């Protein structure tokens, strides 16, 4: 199995498209052999890596400063 950690997300998406196209072709040809299984596993691995990255981006705290307080309350 390939190591996808070192690839950029755009490269992962390109690989996902490529392997999905191969799977689609194999399905249309009704070829459910080892090649089909291999590409199916690769697609699953690529999807897992992309999902992992999405999860880490969504849960990573930002380093931005606190937004200004524009409330209408009087401050003294």
Image (cartoon, grey):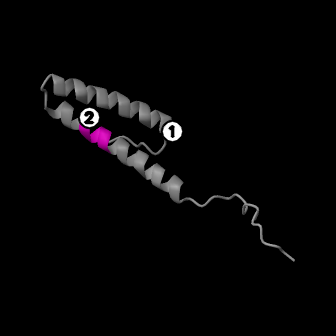
The stretch of residues the image draws in magenta is 40-44
Residue 33, percent from left and from top: 13, 32
Mark 1 crowd level (few <14, some 14–19, many ≥20, 10 Å Cα): few
Q: Main secondary structure of the magenta part?
A: helix
What whole-number distance in Å separates the C-alpha atoms at marks 2 and 1? 20 Å
Q: Secondary structure at mark 1?
A: loop
Label count reads 2
Q: Quadrant of residue 64?
A: bottom right
Residue 58 lies, with reference to residue 7, above or below; the image says below
Looking at the picture, does residue 66 appear above or below residue 19? below
Q: Nearer the viewer, residue 16 or 70?
A: 70
Q: Does the segment drawn in magenta span residue 25?
A: no
Looking at the rendered image, the quarter that the N terminus falls into is top left
Q: What residue would you read off at disc 2?
A: 39
Question: SS of the residue at dot 2?
Answer: helix
Q: Residue furthest right?
A: 76
Q: Check residue 41 for magenta coloring.
A: yes
Q: Quadrant of the C terminus?
A: bottom right
Which residue is pictured at 78% across the width and 72% down the height?
73
Q: Tell me which corner region of the image, top left, top right, bottom left or bottom right, holds residue 18.
A: top left
In the drawing, what numbered circle is on residue 53?
none
Q: Residue at x 83, y 74 (%)?
A: 75
Instruction: Residue at 24%, 30% (x, y): give it.
Output: 23
Q: Position of residue 20 (x, y in %)?
A: 30, 31
Tell me the tag on residue 8: 1
* Neighbours of disc 2 within 10 Å: few (<14), some (14-19), many (20+): some
């Amino acid at each position: 199995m390939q190591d996808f950690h070192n690839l950029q997300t755009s490269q992962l998406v390109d690989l996902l498209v490529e392997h999905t196209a191969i799977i689609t072709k194999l399905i249309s040809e009704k070829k459910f052999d080892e090649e089909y299984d291999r590409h199916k596993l690769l697609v699953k691995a690529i999807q897992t890596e992309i999902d992992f990255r999405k999860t880490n981006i969504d849960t990573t705290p930002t380093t931005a400063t606190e937004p200004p307080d524009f409330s209408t309350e009087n401050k003294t």
